[in-house]
Amino acid sequence: MVMLAPFRQWPVPQQARKLVRRVAIAILQSREGWLGPLAKQATSALYSAGQTELAMSFLKSLFGRKEAKPSGPAAPLKSTEYKGFTIHATPFPEGGQQQLAGVIEKEIDGEVKSHRFIRADRFPGAEEAADFAIIKARQLIDEQDERLFK
């Protein structure tokens, strides 16, 4: 059970504390869902009590702690050669699981060409996702060969 005792230490009117407590309990009970009206009610009570800084920190804690997604492609977890192509398995975290992704590369006319693919498949572990990324890449190579790069 999560303790909500720190709310008692805030120099805030009882009404605002109750609203903040309700919002915190709602957040803990439902990981997703819109808490707009309840959050608005709690922050307006904090503003009216002269607790602007507390209201802003409350809003930041509600909406500002989102997980940052990696900006570029992930580092290859596994790499292998297949029919002259280089396959890099690059699964990435998505929704608490690992999404299947990879890069297929081949040197053509002195230039390294690459094809990045992302599949809808998700796996509980990165190793399993990497293994299936290599299988899917081999399948793409068998089906399309060098047409992958056009």
Image (tube, rainbow, N blue to C red):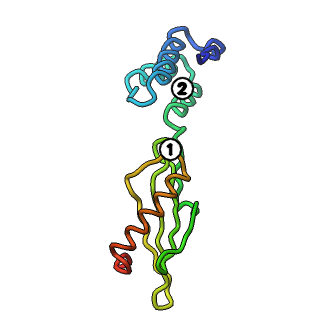
- Where residue 55 sits in the image (x, y, percent)? 54, 26
Residue 134 image offset from top left, x and y in percent: 48, 63
Q: Which residue lies furthest to the bottom in this view?
A: 109
Q: Which residue is drawn at 37% across and 23% down?
A: 37
At label 1, counting other C-alpha atoms closer than 10 Å, the crowd grade (few under 14, some 14-19, many 20 or more) is: few
State which quarter of the image contains the N terminus.
Answer: top right
Depth order, front residue of 120/28 = 120
Q: Which amino acid does label 2 sit on?
A: Ala
Q: For marks 1 and 2, give the one nearer the viewer.
A: 1
Three-letter residue code for mark 1: Pro
Residue at horizontal 51%, vertical 49%?
93
Mark 1 or 2, nearer chain start: 2
Disc 2, SS:
helix
Instruction: Determine the secondary structure under disc 1.
Output: loop
Q: Give the camera-side residue of 57 and 125.
A: 125
Q: Name the residue under label 1.
A: 124
Q: How crowded is mark 2: few (under 14 residues within 10 Å), some or many (20 or more)?
A: many
Q: Does residue 96 sit above or below 145 in this rendering? A: above
Task: Say whether residue 93 is left or right of residue 37.
Answer: right
| The C terminus sits in image quarter | bottom left
Q: Compare residues 93 and 54 and report the one nearer the observer.
A: 93
Mark 1 → mark 2, Cα distance in angstroms? 38 Å
Disc tally is 2
